[in-house]
């Protein structure tokens, strides 16, 4: 096999792999863009902490974490981030 033929084969398989990655990414994007099917808002809770279900997506509950404040359920905003671990 000549060098030119090897280069053509490498280029061909590289283009095929790009096409496969593109199709896979497009399908994954479509799955994430599906809107949840709406349900009656329900709070699954303990005494002062709960989860308000607002819909279902692919058999999974979609909603928000809530806390009870002055007798009312209030949505929370979670904070946090990535922290670097020390190797010491």
Image: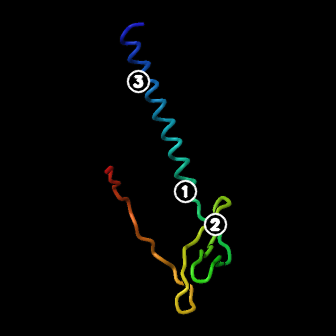
Task: Point out the tag, 2 or 3, that comes first from the N-terminus.
Answer: 3
Residue 29 appears in the picture as rendered: yes
Residue 41 appears in the picture as rendered: no
Which residue, given by chain and number where applicable, does mark 1 sit on?
Answer: 32
- Label 2, secondary structure: give it: strand
Q: Is residue 26 above or below residue 76?
A: above
Please tell me which residue is depicted at 45% across the width and 75% down the height of the picture. 77
| Label drawn at residue 61 | 2
Which residue, given by chain and number where applicable, does mark 3 sit on?
Answer: 11
Residue 34 percent location from the top left of the image: 58, 60
Q: Name the outermost residue toward the bottom.
A: 70
- Label 1, secondary structure: give it: helix
Which of discs 2 and 3 lies nearer the camera? The answer is 2
Task: Point out the tag, 3 or 1, that comes first from the N-terminus.
Answer: 3
Asked whether, in this view, residue 13 is left or right of residue 30, the answer is left
Of residues 48 and 27, which is closer to you in this image? Answer: 48
Q: Residues within 10 Å of mark 3 (few under 14, many from 20)?
A: few
The Cα atoms of the two marked residues, 2 and 3, are separated by 45 Å
Asked whether, in this view, residue 50 is left or right of residue 16, the answer is right
């Amino acid at each position: 096999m000549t060098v030119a033929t090897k280069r053509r084969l490498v280029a061909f398989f590289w283009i095929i792999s790009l096409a496969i990655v593109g199709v896979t990414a497009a399908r994954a994007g479509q799955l994430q863009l599906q809107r949840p099917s709406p349900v009656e808002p329900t709070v699954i809770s303990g005494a002062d902490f709960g989860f308000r279900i607002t819909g279902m997506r692919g058999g999974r509950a979609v909603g928000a974490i809530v806390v009870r404040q002055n007798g009312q359920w209030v949505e929370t905003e979670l904070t946090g981030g990535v922290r670097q671990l020390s190797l010491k």
